[in-house]
């Protein structure tokens, strides 16, 4: 691999073997990612020390300056433009062990668990111990699909990122929105504005302006999305279930999540089936959907309706569910009122749903999934 252009070298290799479609807009971003990887290679790793380590000492009376890594990157643009792929190449190219790549929902779940643990200790600043743990283990922190929809999350993320920046952690993040549009029109948004200024101060903001959605071009295989919701869709879902499970007698799938039980009505091995209402009509959250995504290789969802203001809460849960399934490479079968691009045509939340529709389209490819369907019941 080229020392001068490590991410570009991986990109070129992907183009040569057909895993990456060469794109001029993506290539314009590569020099910035190469600079980050080179900077990490040239920045000395912090040395572990007694008495709480270098990070704990930096906040004490005798704090020593944290080694500063290279300046990070905020990469934004439309859905399906290759932002996550470029981030993955950066993580792969970085010649350090202390690196982490995480999706927003998974990250916030981890943070909430850390905050709860800190509260039990009586800590006055519960965000600081979480930041200390991350910074002690991480020099490159890659944060995919930043999307702020809650003021509590907004305040936590702002405080956490300030501490990570101060600790010398290099942050690379992706988003569908320019920083100024994060948490747009949100309640008490003025409290979030300092974080936007912090992003501009500490990260290079770059737009990935490709006019192609690479997910739309992927070849499809077996049919996994059945629309509209009619008798034909029901029969097709039943046939897919029988094929995947060999008509074995299903049992409920019960998952313990934070002291509660999340139940899907039918499962056979690592194939599960539930209705849209089972999954999105109840007050489930990211932790629940992450548990589902970890427990199954194939998920079948019956009855995805049209989405909009009339069922906004359910639509938000569906977006979170799809994110969890996508990150875990779960094979998805669904019956729905319409094609993904037409499920949420207008209104509050329709912009965010464009990314979900793009992901649903990508998940229809024959090669999608972390295992072959035939192995799912093993």
Image (spheres, rainbow, N blue to C red):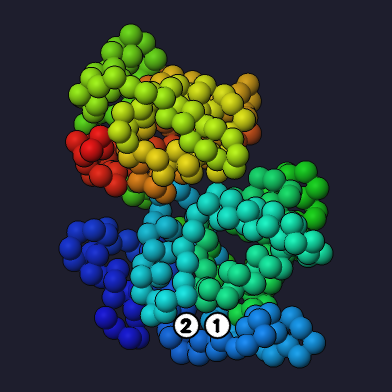
Numbered disc 2: secondary structure: helix
- Does residue 88 sit above or below 369 in this rendering? below
Residue 274 in view, yes or no: no
Q: What mark, if any, has residue 40 been given in the picture? A: 2
Q: How far apart are labels 1 and 2 at the CA level?
A: 6 Å
Numbered disc 1: secondary structure: loop
Determine which quarter of the picture holds residue 333. top left
Image quarter in which the N terminus is found: bottom left
The answer to which of marks 1 and 2 sits earlier in the sequence is 2
Residue 200 picture location, percent across and down: 65, 69
Image quarter in which the C terminus is found: top left
Front one among 292 and 161:
292
Residue at (64%, 50%) from the top-left corner? 148
Determine which quarter of the picture holds residue 309. top right
- Does residue 334 sit above or below 94 in this rendering? above
- Does residue 141 sit above or below 366 in this rendering? below
Residue at (69%, 45%) from the top-left corner? 150
Left or right: 117, with 285 as reference point: right
Do tag 1 and tag 2 residues touch (Cβ < 8 Å)?
yes
In the rendered image, which residue does mark 1 sit on? 69
Residue at (59%, 42%) from the top-left corner? 258
Left or right: 52, with 293 as reference point: right
Q: Residues within 10 Å of mark 1 (few under 14, many from 20)?
A: many
Front one among 175 and 322:
322
């Amino acid at each position: 691999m080229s020392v001068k252009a490590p991410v570009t070298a991986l990109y070129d290799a992907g183009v040569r073997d057909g895993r990456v479609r060469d794109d001029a807009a993506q290539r314009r971003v590569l020099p910035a990612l190469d600079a980050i990887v080179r900077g990490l290679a040239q920045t000395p790793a912090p040395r572990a020390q007694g008495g709480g380590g270098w990070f704990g000492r930096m906040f004490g009376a005798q704090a020593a300056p944290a080694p500063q890594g290279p300046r990070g990157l905020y990469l934004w643009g439309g859905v399906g433009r290759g932002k996550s792929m470029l981030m993955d190449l950066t993580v792969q190219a970085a010649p350090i062990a202390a690196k982490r790549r995480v999706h927003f929902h998974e990250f916030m779940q981890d943070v909430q668990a850390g905050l709860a643990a800190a509260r039990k200790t009586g800590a006055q600043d519960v965000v600081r111990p979480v930041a200390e743990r991350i910074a002690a283990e991480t020099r490159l922190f890659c944060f995919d699909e930043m999307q702020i929809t809650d003021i509590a999350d907004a305040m936590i993320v702002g405080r956490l990122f300030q501490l990570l920046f101060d600790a010398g952690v290099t942050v690379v993040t992706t988003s569908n929105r320019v920083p100024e549009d994060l948490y747009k029109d949100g309640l008490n948004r003025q409290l979030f504005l300092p974080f936007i200024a912090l992003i501009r101060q500490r990260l290079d903001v770059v737009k990935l302006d490709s006019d192609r959605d690479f997910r739309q071009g992927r070849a499809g295989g077996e049919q996994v999305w059945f629309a509209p919701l009619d008798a034909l869709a029901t029969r097709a879902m039943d046939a897919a279930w029988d094929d995947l499970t060999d008509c074995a007698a299903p049992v409920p799938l019960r998952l313990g999540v934070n002291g509660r039980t999340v139940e899907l009505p039918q499962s056979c091995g690592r194939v599960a089936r539930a209705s849209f209402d089972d999954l999105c009509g109840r007050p489930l959250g990211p932790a629940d959907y992450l548990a589902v995504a970890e427990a199954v290789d194939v998920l079948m969802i019956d009855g995805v309706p049209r989405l909009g203001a009339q069922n906004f809460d359910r639509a938000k849960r569906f977006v979170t569910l799809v994110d969890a399934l996508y990150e875990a490479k779960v094979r998805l079968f669904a019956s729905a009122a319409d094609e993904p691009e037409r499920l949420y045509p207008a209104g509050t939340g329709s912009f965010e749903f464009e990314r979900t529709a793009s992901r649903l389209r990508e998940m229809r490819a024959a090669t999608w999934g972390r295992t072959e369907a035939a192995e799912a019941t093993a």
